[in-house]
Each structure stands twice: as C-alpha cells, then as structure tokens.
Amino acid sequence: MPETAFPNLIPALPEIFLAVAAMLLLMIGVFSREELAARTAGYGSVIVLIVAIVFVGLVAEGRVLTFGGAFVTDPFAVFVKVMTLIAAAAAILMSRSYLEDHKINRFEFPVLVLLAALGMLMMVSANDLIALYLGLELQSLALYVIASFQRDSTRSAEAGLKYFVLGAVASGLLLYGMTLVYGFSGTTNFDVLEKLFADSNAGAPVGVIVGVVFIIAGLAFKISAVPFHMWTPDVYEGAPTPVTALLAVAPKIAAMGLFIRVMTGPFGDLSGQWQQIIIFISIASMVLGAFAAINQKNIKRLMAYSSIGHMGYALIGLAVAGQTGSPAVQSDGLHGMLVYLAIYMVMNLGTFACILLMKKDGRMMEDINDLAGLSKTNPALAAVLTIFMFSMAGIPPLAGFLGKLYVFQSAIQAELFGLAIIGVLASVVGAFYYLRIVKVMYFDQPEDGLDGPISFEMKSILGVMGVVILLFIFLPGPLLSGAEAASAALLPG
C-alpha cells in the first residue's frame, strides 16, 4: 500500500497531541462552571504545551517525511518548535492576572492559543506549499480572534479588524505566489521544486520568480518586516497586552522558521533572484525600526517598532544564507539567525512581563512616563527591566549583544559589508529609545508606585528570563550547539 494511505503518524505526534488536547479542553470548558473552566483551561494548556515540547524532542530522529512528503521533521523543525512552544506557554502564564483583572478570563483564550501554536508547528514542518498555507491560516485565524478578545474595548476590536483585513491581503499575495509557482513548475512539493531548480540549466521561468516575490511579500507580512509592517503598531497597541506579548514572539519565530525553510529549500538555487529582496527588507526594517520608535510615548507601540527592527537584524542571517559559493558561510548565517531569534524570544517575553506589571489603582499604564522613578518605588522590577533594555540595545556582555554579534559577523564573512554597517548604525540609533526608558526609571521624579504584589507566575518568568540574559555569555553552549545542528540540517556541508 502507498505511504499516503497509512501515513507514519509518529513525526506529527506533537501536532496530533496539541489538536486532541485543544478539543478536549474545549469540551471541558463548555461543560464546566465559568471560573473552573477558565482555570482548568489555563493551567491545562500550559501542561499540554510542556508535554508537546517533550514529544517534539522524542520524535527528533534526523530528517523524516510523512503525509506524502508534505510534512517533515528534522533538527531545524525541532529547534524552532521548542522556541515557539516555550513562547506560547509563557504568554498563557502571563495572561492570567490580566484576564482576571479585565473580567475576560474565559476558557476560550488558552484554547485559541493552543490552536495557534498547532498552526505554528505545522508551518515549521511544512514541506509543501499547500501544507504551508494550511498551517499559516490555522495560526492566523486563531490570532485574529484573540487580538479582539477584549470585546468591550473599541481599541481591541479595531486591532482585531485591522489584523484580519491586512492578514487577508497578505494571504491573497501568498496564494497568488503559490499558484504562479505551481503553474510554471507543476508541483507544490518542496523537495521536487528544489531538485527541479537544481537540475535546470536555463534557470527558473519568469513566472516562478514573480511567484517567489509574492511568497516573500506574504511571509514578510507575518514577521512584520518593512514594507509590510503597517499593521504592527496599531495591533500591538490595541490588542490585550498578553496577546501583544504572544504576537511579538511565537508567530514571528514560527514564520521566520518557515521563511528560512522556503528560501533555503525549494528556492535555494534561486538565491541570486531573492537575496537582493531580503537585503532590502532587512535594511528597511532596521532603519524604520530604529528611527520610528524614537518619538513613541506608548511603550507597546515602541515595542512594535522595536520588533520590526529586530526582524531586520534577524533577516541579515537569511541574506547571508543566500550568498552562493560558500556553504560554510551560508550555514553561519542561519546559525546566527537562529541564535538571534532565541535571544529575541527571551528579551521580549521578559519585557512584556514587565509591561504587564505596569498597573496603578487596578488600571493598566502604557505611557513610558508612567515608569518615572520606578527605581525608587520598585527597585527589583526596575533592575530587571533595565537588563532587558540593555540587552535589546546590544550592550555587552548581555545576550542581546552576542545575538547581534553573530549575525553581523556572518554578514562580514559573506562580504556583505554594507548590510553589516547599516545594522550597526541602526543598532546605535535604536539604543537611544531603550536607554531613554532606563533614564525615566532612574533619573525622573517618582510618581505613585505600581500596584503589587507580583504573582508567582510573573516572578518566575522575570527571574528565568533575566538570568538567561545575564548568564548566557557564561553558558552559551546548549543554544549554540542546537542552532548549529538546526542550520546543518537545512544546509549540510
């Protein structure tokens, strides 16, 4: 019997487990009392995500294909999936107090996060254009709903609507690109496409190149890279803060993993056509992220532009991976990119945990000036937030500095000197608005202190993330070796 009739389900065990667990929690929520349902779904979903991480590790046995070659698991998928699941679990833990304070603590929220995580895992393991689209849309549909989860807030409803409308446009661009690639190549499978373009002496047809451009546009929207970033500041500001924390980390890591797989796999031999586009997107994102955030007074909007800039830095690694002629340099680019994404995850989760603690008299504060004198009213929180701001600014010896060092170093090795120089200059400009937050906390006159006490979940997240940022330089081995194995799986040799 063909493999498609009875596919090997073991490689997809984490995804199957997430799907079944989400449906189970949904049923429990429907038939339970409201408070019990919310608590059960909240903590149950975190446990489910932790178990899913274990399953991801258990099925990691080299490169394995299933579902007719449409689904792949390899060390690269394992690395990105673990980061995605950690980010989703942390976002759920951070959301509990916020949802309770705003009286929107319903069981649907963690279930939707689980379904979004399921879509992200499917994206990362996609080995076919159709599988890619299914994962992307499953993730997006769940995120559209939770972006407008605070139904009584017009800002939240506006954020969800903007995200949905612009996301639909991006999906259209992506689908159009996929149809062009299929129409001119006759296949949607990544392995077949890779072999087709590798064996073609005449190069790819113009229609395929146009299709690749549209696919890049659709994926650039998902990581909020310039010029497809327009949704990011409004959605970050309007969505509930725990949702913003999730949007800033998990979907971007998964979409960046998908970006890497698509560009280095089926279209790896067309890098001469797409490398310049990636370089332009990277430069534009770094520059806009650096300068647009300078005048921001709302800390969530500032983090939106910061996120755009960080995606620009990460894309330097993908541009290096498109440098033909030196597999070792290409692998270094991906290695640096994966290290940067892991550090980006830790910095952002920690920063958003601090933002979620910006409460006065039970109301969320989002203005940067609300942090005035925090070092005197809450010195521990000010110290932790300072660590994250210094790391984002790239100040040594914190983890953020090492992340930027790896991607800039890979650009220099690939002789993309202009890209590295612009990245360093953008990083210097960006340091201004990170250090301004530190200045407000330590040198401005204190106002009323923030509400307390801090919950155990938030203390745990702040402690773990802060320690990782501080001590990464002393124990970088596990992350570096994991990123090296992941990049080697895509670019062997």
Image (cartoon, helix red, strand yellow):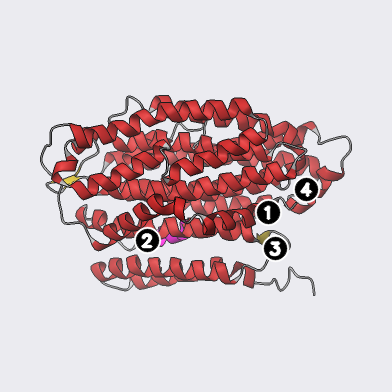
Q: Residue at x 17, y 31 (%)?
A: 444
Left or right: 232 as drawn, with respect to 370? right
Q: Which mark is residue 488?
A: 1
Residue 228: x and y in percent read 51, 32
What amino acid is at disc 1? Ala
**Disc 1 secondary structure class:** helix
Residue under circle 3?
A: 63
Q: Which residues are magenta?
A: 109-116
What amino acid is at disc 3? Arg
Q: Are marks 3 and 1 in contact (CB under 8 Å)?
A: no
10 Å neighbourhood of mark 2: few (<14), some, or many (≥20)?
many
Q: Earlier in the sequence, mark 1 or mark 4?
A: 4
What amino acid is at disc 4? Glu
Residue under circle 2?
A: 110
The count of marks equals 4
The stretch drawn in magenta includes residue 225: no
Rounded to the nearest whole Å, what is the CA distance between mark 2 and mark 1?
A: 34 Å
Nearer to us in this view, 180 or 43:
43
Residue 5: x and y in percent read 73, 71
Q: Which mark is residue 194?
A: 4
Rounded to the nearest whole Å, what is the CA distance between mark 2 and mark 3?
A: 31 Å
